[in-house]
Image: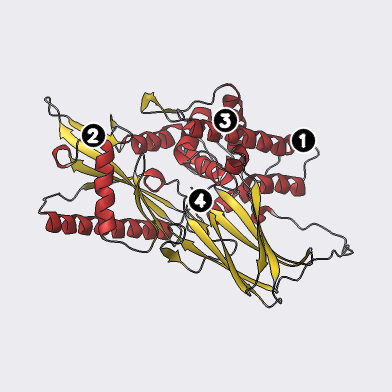
């Protein structure tokens, strides 16, 4: 296989891997939110004459597993297990999540959306881009003196919050090639492979693919270690996961084989989409094993996989190009503000065109102004892209506002599908489009 292993290593260290300083910063965010949670508990205790205790905290997810990748837009998941004594929480799992939601809402911060009790956690989103998931647990002691942990999902379910982290850490140590046994690659190869796979699955805004846990489990089932090169290990693992998914799209918790993580249709759809993306990757990477492969072709293959200019090579182009006519874009001033509900509370009035990440189930108010003389018609065109919009299907719609007699006008849209979407504002006079401006928004899960 054509050898770009050194360049893959540089890509991993310079582009993919979360630096220790960034990891420490995320842990500071976690600390801040735990202080906010405890402060909310104090406030509720005072207001309602309650005596809720502070919870015990355990780190979970990619930060604990050391598989968090760097994101230029700060789209980080911070997963925290919040553990209360069983007798201090409501009987139902839902009401327990709602109670923690209530604690957090007591002390609002720089939220882009209010804390929300979702099915598996209470989530808060921040305008900086990251979000924090508080997974709620209750703890008790059985008659043998064993500590029992139960997670507040759709119902209470026995689950130790450290099991997944311990499983993953053990797999990294026992399955990765080791320099003490003749390997020339750095230790902990499996962790690098997982991070690189996660980089692939999040390489396009419009892809809606499985989360890090499912990727880690699939990687563990299909991992091909290589004692000398990470690039060989990665290509073989990609091929192996694709072949696995061709015949079976179910993924189970490795610490509880009775628990299927892909039981819901939403998660099955994500895995099926992953299979299709891997199929494309397998096809693109075939060139690496061809005798015709050279450095440019190898770089081109890896560039497609990671969608990164890190792999870009200079391509000679013909300077002569056909000029195409386009409408002037400075005739319309277009901006957007973020609202919690239509005509409701405004959360952010500075939504950046093209790279501002917005949660689902929010409202955007697009405000426009022009120096074109009135009256005119305004057409608003929405173009949706991405796996979720295609699956619906809902690839866009148009709205026509006729006979506008003001130089300022607005339009509302709700955020619904993960991906990068476009709104186009057109001014029409005498049945002709005389001005057009676009605004791109990125919607996250």
Label 1 and label 3: CA atoms lie apart by 22 Å
Circle 2 or circle 3, nearest the eye: 2
Q: How is the image coloured?
A: secondary structure
Identified at 76% across, 49% down, the residue is: 296
Circle 1 or circle 3, nearest the eye: 3
Label 4 and label 1: CA atoms lie apart by 38 Å
Q: Please tell me how crowded label 4 is: few (under 14), some (14-19), or many (20+) other residues with Cα within 10 Å.
A: many
**Disc 3 designates what residue?**
241
Location of residue 149 (image quadrant) = top left
User: Would residue 1 be visible to someone looking at this image?
Assistant: no
Question: Residue 308: which disc?
Answer: none
Label 2 and label 4: CA atoms lie apart by 31 Å
Identified at 61% across, 26% down, the residue is: 243
Question: Do the residues under discs 1 and 2 have CB atoms within 8 angstroms?
Answer: no
| 1 or 2: tag closer to the N-terminus | 2
Q: Please tell me how crowded label 2 is: few (under 14), some (14-19), or many (20+) other residues with Cα within 10 Å.
A: many
Circle 2 or circle 4, nearest the eye: 4
**Disc 4 designates what residue?**
444
| 4 or 1: tag closer to the N-terminus | 1
Left or right of 240, for residue 98 = left
| 1 or 3: tag closer to the N-terminus | 3
Identify the secondary structure beneath mark 1: loop
**Disc 1 designates what residue?**
290
| 3 or 4: tag closer to the N-terminus | 3
Label 3 and label 4: CA atoms lie apart by 25 Å
Label 1 and label 2: CA atoms lie apart by 53 Å
Identify the secondary structure beneath mark 3: helix
Say above or below: 383 vs 353.
Answer: above
Question: Do the residues under discs 4 and 1 have CB atoms within 8 angstroms?
Answer: no
């Amino acid at each position: 296989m054509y050898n770009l292993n050194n360049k893959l290593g540089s890509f991993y260290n310079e582009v993919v891997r979360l630096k220790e300083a960034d990891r420490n910063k995320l842990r500071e965010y976690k600390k801040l939110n735990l202080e906010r949670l405890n402060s909310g508990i104090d406030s509720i205790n005072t207001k309602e004459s309650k005596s809720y205790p502070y919870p015990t905290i355990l780190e979970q997810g990619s930060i604990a597993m050391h598989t968090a990748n760097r994101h230029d837009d700060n789209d980080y998941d911070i997963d925290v297990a919040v553990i209360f004594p069983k007798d201090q929480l409501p009987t139902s799992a839902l009401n327990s999540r709602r109670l923690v939601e209530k604690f957090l809402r007591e002390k609002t911060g720089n939220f882009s959306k209010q804390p929300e009790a979702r099915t598996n956690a209470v989530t808060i989103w921040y305008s900086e881009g990251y979000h924090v998931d508080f997974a709620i647990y209750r703890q008790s002691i059985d008659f043998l003196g064993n500590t029992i942990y139960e997670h507040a999902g759709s119902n209470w379910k026995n689950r130790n919050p450290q099991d997944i982290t311990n499983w993953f850490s053990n797999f990294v140590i026992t399955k990765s090639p080791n320099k003490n046994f003749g390997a020339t690659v750095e230790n902990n190869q499996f962790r690098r492979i997982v991070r690189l796979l996660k980089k692939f699955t999040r390489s396009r805004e419009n892809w809606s693919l499985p989360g890090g846990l499912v990727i880690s489990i699939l990687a563990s089932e299909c991992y091909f270690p290589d004692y000398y090169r990470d690039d060989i290990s990665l290509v073989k693992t990609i091929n192996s996961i694709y072949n696995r998914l061709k015949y079976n799209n179910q993924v189970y918790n490795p610490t509880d084989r009775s628990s299927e993580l892909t039981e819901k249709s939403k998660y099955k759809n994500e895995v099926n989409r992953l299979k299709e993306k891997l199929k494309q990757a397998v096809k693109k990477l075939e060139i690496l094993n061809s005798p015709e492969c050279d450095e440019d072709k190898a770089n081109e293959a890896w560039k497609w996989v990671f969608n990164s200019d890190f792999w870009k090579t200079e391509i000679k182009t013909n300077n002569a190009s056909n000029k195409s006519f386009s409408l002037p874009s400075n005739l319309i001033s277009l901006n957007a503000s973020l609202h919690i509900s239509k005509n409701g509370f405004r959360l952010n009035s500075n939504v950046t065109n093209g790279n501002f990440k917005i949660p689902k189930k929010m409202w955007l108010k697009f405000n426009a102004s022009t120096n074109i003389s009135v009256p005119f018609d305004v057409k608003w065109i929405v173009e949706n892209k991405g796996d979720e919009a295609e699956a619906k299907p809902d690839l866009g719609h148009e709205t026509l506002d006729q006979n506008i007699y003001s130089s300022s006008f607005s339009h509302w849209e709700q955020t619904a599908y993960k991906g990068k979407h476009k709104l186009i504002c057109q001014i029409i006079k005498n049945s002709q489009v005389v001005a057009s401006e676009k605004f791109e928004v990125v919607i996250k899960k």
